[in-house]
């Protein structure tokens, strides 16, 4: 696995990030440790978790795995924002909750610093000054190394970035958006912004929760127990992905899988990795077999023809100025002047 620069920072991360949302949930501690061993054994150094995954058990499992290992050799990203306590301040991006969330994560991870602390989502209640001022102090105190965000819209990220610049604070350096061959709205604002500002991008659900592996051949709504979708508490979300466009995408991925000798998961992940705005997709696995499959997504490239076929088949319905016509027109205008 290769390493890449984490956006504009000097930090290096592996080109795949290991997601740990399954730890303490679909993967027990033994399996989670095997997944971590196999990932790092293959050159992976980048791990993503969150304080709320399995009510903190994901961080605890990583913390126990870290014991006796070289903490410096891995880059750990976690998140804070969602509810961890029942009381009114047990949620959000206030100074009070952020500081207690970071202290609790440090304890569970058995470490004295977090490499990347990401705000898990926008908080409409807390002023940005309070959140980013607190994050700045946490960097200054040495409790966190870098600031990242997740699930922000591009305007929200820019607002935070410009605030930090105007105050001389440590800036957010990464964004973690929802992005895969089915969910491409991220390309309208977030990815161009990330390229323009040199922001690191870590897409989550790069396999659409497993749909892009082709495992739901009988239909997403027929998903059986023991799978993410079969056990989901929000099955309606996944059922919403069941449509003609998804079927076309899956048929194409299956055909390209046959042509390349790669699995559908590897083809879908390679498409995400090939985007120049993407730093490292976050791969999820419930067992070592799935992880091994997903690790095979690097070290090769889809051809230009395969890329454009996937792009065309999965194109979302958009209007000017988000469509190709606008880009072509802008390009033509610049060529003439
Ligand atoms: N910031 C956020 O709001 C946010 C949200 C979601 C996730 N995340 C992060 O992103 C990571 C990845 O998200 P995700 O788990 O949704 O990713 P994903 O890759 O879209 O889905 C992973 C799931 O797909 C199935 N799967 C994966 N590889 C497979 C393979 N090779 N063959 C067959 N099935 C396979 C497994 O589920 P089954 O075996 O159950 O089918 C696995 O748990 C998470 O661990 C977390 O770190 C962040």
Image (spheres, rainbow, N blue to C red):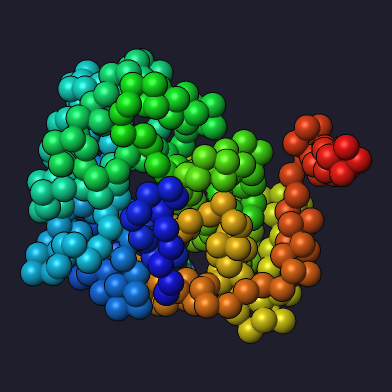
The residue furthest front is 337
Instruction: Quarter of the image for the C terminus: give it.
Output: top right
Q: Residue furthest right?
A: 336
Horizontal arrangement in the rendering, residue 173 relative to residue 41 (left or right) = right
Observer-nearest of 211 and 321: 321
Name the spot of residue 293 as percent of width and height, x first: 47, 76
Left or right position of 309 against 288: right
Which residue occupies 35% across, 78% down? 42
Q: Would you say residue 312 is visible in this rendering?
A: yes
Q: Give left or right: position of 179 versus 324.
A: left
The one nearer the camera, 180 or 169, is 169
Query: Quick check: can you spot residue 215?
Result: no
Q: Is residue 288 above or below residue 204?
A: below
Q: Looking at the image, which residue is at 27% across and 24% down?
A: 133
Q: Quadrant of ligand 1?
A: bottom left
Q: Residue at x 69, y 63 (%)?
A: 250
User: What is the quadrant of residue 90 in the picture?
Assistant: top left
Quadrant of the rendered image containing residue 61: bottom left
Kindly identify the residue that appears in the image at 58 percent across and 67 percent down.
Answer: 270
Q: Position of residue 169 (x, y in %)?
A: 31, 28
Query: Residue 115's x, y, as percent?
Result: 25, 50
Front residue of 208/230: it is 208
Looking at the image, residue 168 lies above or below residue 104: above
Residue 203: x and y, percent? 49, 51
């Amino acid at each position: 696995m290769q390493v890449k620069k984490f956006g504009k920072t000097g930090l290096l991360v592996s080109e795949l990030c290991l997601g740990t949302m399954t730890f303490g949930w679909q993967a027990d501690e033994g399996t989670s440790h095997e997944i971590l061993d196999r990932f790092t054994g293959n050159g992976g150094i980048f791990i993503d978790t969150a304080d709320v995954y399995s009510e903190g058990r994901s961080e605890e499992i990583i913390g126990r795995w870290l014991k006796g290992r070289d903490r410096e050799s891995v880059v750990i990203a976690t998140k804070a924002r969602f509810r961890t306590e029942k009381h009114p301040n047990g949620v959000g991006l206030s100074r009070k909750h952020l500081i207690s969330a970071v202290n609790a994560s440090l304890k569970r991870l058995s470490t004295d610093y977090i490499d990347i602390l990401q705000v898990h989502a926008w908080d409409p209640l807390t002023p940005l000054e309070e959140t980013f001022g607190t994050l700045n102090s946490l960097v200054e105190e040495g409790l966190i190394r870098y600031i990242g965000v997740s699930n922000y819209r591009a305007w929200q990220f820019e607002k935070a970035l410009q605030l930090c610049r105007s105050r001389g604070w440590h800036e957010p350096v990464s964004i973690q958006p929802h992005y895969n061959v089915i969910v491409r709205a991220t390309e309208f604002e977030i990815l161009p912004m990330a390229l323009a500002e040199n922001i690191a991008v870590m897409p989550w659900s790069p396999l659409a929760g497993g749909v892009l592996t082709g495992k739901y051949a009988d239909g997403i709504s027929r998903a059986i127990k023991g799978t993410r979708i079969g056990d989901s508490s929000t099955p309606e979300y996944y059922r919403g992905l069941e449509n003609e466009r998804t079927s076309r995408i899956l048929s194409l991925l299956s055909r390209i899988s046959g042509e390349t000798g790669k699995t559908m998961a590897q083809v879908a992940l390679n498409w995400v990795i090939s985007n120049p705005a993407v730093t490292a997709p976050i791969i999820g696995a419930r067992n070592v077999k799935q992880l091994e499959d997903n690790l095979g997504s690097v070290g090769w490239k889809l051809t230009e023809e395969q890329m454009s076929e996937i792009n065309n088949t999965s194109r979302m319905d958009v209007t000017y100025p988000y469509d190709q016509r606008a880009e072509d027109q802008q390009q033509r205008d610049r060529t003439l002047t």
